Amino acid sequence: MQFEFMPKGPFDLANQNQYFGGWLTLGSDPATIVMAFPVEGWKGSAALALRQAADGRIVGEVSGPPELAEKARSQGLACLSLDVDGEGWPDVGRRDAVMGQLQEQYAYLRPVLFHSPYEAAAAFIIGHRISVKQRQVIMGRMAEQLGDELVVGGQSFYAFPGPQALLLLRSYPGLNEQKVERLHGVALAALEGWLDRDELRAMPVEAALSRLESIAGIGPFFASGILYRGAGLVDGIPQEDVTPYAIQNAYHLTESPDRVQLESIAQGWQPFRMWANVLLHVWVRSEIGLPRRRSFSARK
C-alpha cells in the first residue's frame, strides 16, 4: 500500500532520524527510512518505508499482508508522533523563550516512540542492567532469527518477534532465565490487550501505570517509559530526575526545581508537555551531559 501524508505542524524526517531513529535505509535511496515491526493485533508483521518530499509531504509504502496495511501505516506514523496535530507545537516556544530557542535549535523535534508499547516493554526487560548497545544487538539478533522477514526494494528487513514467538522462547544467548520468563509475561500481556497503545493513552495516567506495573518485571521506572515512550502520551511529565536537572540548567535556576516548581514551569508547555520534556532531554544529553550518579523514580 502506497500513501502520502502531510504532517500537521513542522516536521523534518531526516532530523528525527539523526537524533532518535537510527533506522535502516534503502541502499537505492538513503533518504528513505525503513521500520519493520509486529503489527498490533499480533496477526503478522509489516515494514514501512518513508521518505519526505521537498514540499514536506511524507511518502510511504507498506510491505506485508494487505489486511494489516492500514494498521501498520497508523502504527508507523504514531512511532514518529505524526498521528498528533502539531500545528500548536511552535506556540509553546512563543510563550516560553527557553523552549522556543530549543525548538529552533532542534528543528521542532518530536518524540520518536517504540513501535508499540509491547516492544517498549520487551526492550526494557531485555535491556535491564546492560548497555543500550548490548540491548540493541540482542533485539536485532532476535528479529533476524525469530521475527518475520520483510522485503523492501530487494532488501530484507526483520521485525522483532511478536508475542506468540516470545511465548515459545525457552532460552536465548544474552538473556538469563529470569528475563526469558519476564518476556513471557510481556507477551501474555500483549495478547490479552494490556499493552494496547490507544487504550493506554485513553486511561488516566495512574491507572495506566498501575496496569503496567502489574506485569512481572515492570517496576515504576519501566512502566513510565512504556507509557510515555511506548504508548506516546503527548501532554504529561513523568517523574524522574533528568527533567529537573535539565530545567535547572536550561532556565538557569540556582537549584533543582521541586515538583511544584517543575509543574509551574511546564504549564506553559501545554498541551505538549511531553514533547517539551523530550526536547529538554535531547538538549541536556547533547550539550551538557548527565551527572555521573543519578537515581530514578517514576512516581512520588
Image (cartoon, rainbow, N blue to C red):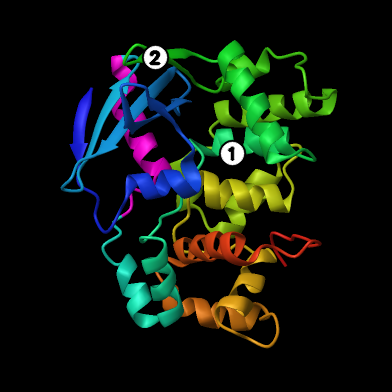
Q: Which residues are magenta?
A: 66-84
Residue at image coords 77%, 15%: 171
- Residue toward you, 102 or 230: 102
Image quarter of residue 190: top right
The residue type indicated by label 1 comes to Ala
Q: In the visual, does 85 lie left or right of 75?
A: left
Pair 2/1: label in front: 2
Neighbor class of circle 2 (other Cα within 10 Å; few <14, some 14-19, many 20+) is few
Q: Residue furthest left?
A: 55
Quadrant where the N terminus sits is top left
**Is 114 above or below relative to 16?**
above
Disc 2: which residue: 155
Image quarter of residue 75: top left
> How many labels, in total?
2
Q: Which mark is residue 150?
A: none
**Is 102 above or below relative to 142?**
below
Q: Tell me residue 169's x, y (percent).
A: 70, 14
Quadrant where the C terminus sits is bottom right
Q: Tell me residue 135's x, y (percent).
A: 68, 33
- Residue toward you, 131 or 86: 131
- Residue toward you, 11 or 200: 11
> Does 102 appear in magenta?
no
Q: Tell me residue 64's x, y (percent).
A: 35, 16
The mark nearer the N terminus, 2 or 1, is 1
